[in-house]
Image (spheres, rainbow, N blue to C red):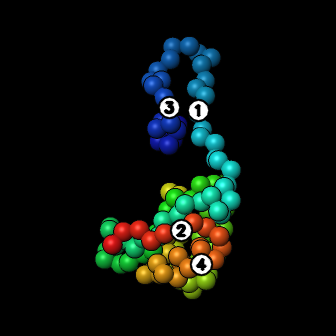
Amino acid sequence: MSKNNKKNRDGIVYSTDPGFEYTYNDPKESSTLPPQQQSLKVLLDKKLRAGKQVTLVTGFTGTTEDLEKLGKELKSKCGVGGSVKDGEIIIQGDFTERVLKILIEKGYKAKKSGG
């Protein structure tokens, strides 16, 4: 059994029943809200990144596929690299103003957060 599956077990440590199979409670992805109902935060971050700046977009509510599509569009419009991890879009470099402008043009309720 992989370590990931062990973390998802709720309170079951051991069972003496030979026919026991644990059923996992996998969280279902929520459907993607329309852009007008999304409340996104755009912030600049340097923590745990060896002093390099990245622009983070947090607060997206929806499927992973839609988040990755939005991340890909933001990266291509900024002309830089980045990734989508843990429900956040990470854009390499300080592009907070540009990302904020793009999100507002697409109809998202986005605001700048942090210093």
Whether the residues at callouts 4 and 1 have beta carbons within 8 Å, the answer is no
Q: Which mark is residue 110?
A: 2
The secondary structure type at the circle numbered 3 is loop
Q: Earlier in the sequence, mark 2 or mark 3?
A: 3
**Looking at the picture, how far across and down is residue 27, in whole percent?**
59, 40
- Tell me residue 113's x, y (percent): 41, 68
Q: Earlier in the sequence, mark 3 or mark 4?
A: 3
Q: CA distance from mark 3 to mark 4?
A: 41 Å
On the question of residue 58 being in view, the answer is: yes
> In the shown orientation, is residue 12 left or right of residue 29?
left
Residue picked out by circle 4:
102
Inter-mark Cα distance, 1 to 2: 35 Å
Per the image, the residue denoted by label 3 is 9
> Label 4 is placed on what type of residue?
Ile
Nearest the viewer among 81 and 99 is 99
> Which corner quadrant of the image does residue 114 belong to?
bottom left
Label 1 Cα neighbours within 10 Å, binned few <14 / some 14-19 / many ≥20 = few
Viewer-nearest of discs 3 and 4: 4
- Asked which quadrant contains residue 70, the reply is bottom right
> What residue type is disc 1 on?
Tyr
Residue 77, relative to residue 9: is it above or below? below
Query: What residue do we see at 62% from left, 81% from top?
Result: 76
Label 1, secondary structure: give it.
loop
Q: Can you identify the residue that label 1 sits on?
A: 24
Tell me whether the residue at label 3 lies in contact with that at label 1, contact meaning CB atoms closer than 8 angstroms.
yes
- Mark 4 vs mark 1, foreground winner is 4
Residue at the spot 57% in from the left edge and 86% down from the top edge: 79
Q: CA distance from mark 4 to mark 2?
A: 10 Å
Q: Earlier in the sequence, mark 1 or mark 2?
A: 1
Instruction: Residue 24: give x, y in percent of width and height.
Output: 59, 32
In the structure shown, which secondary structural element does the residue marked by tag 2 occupy? strand
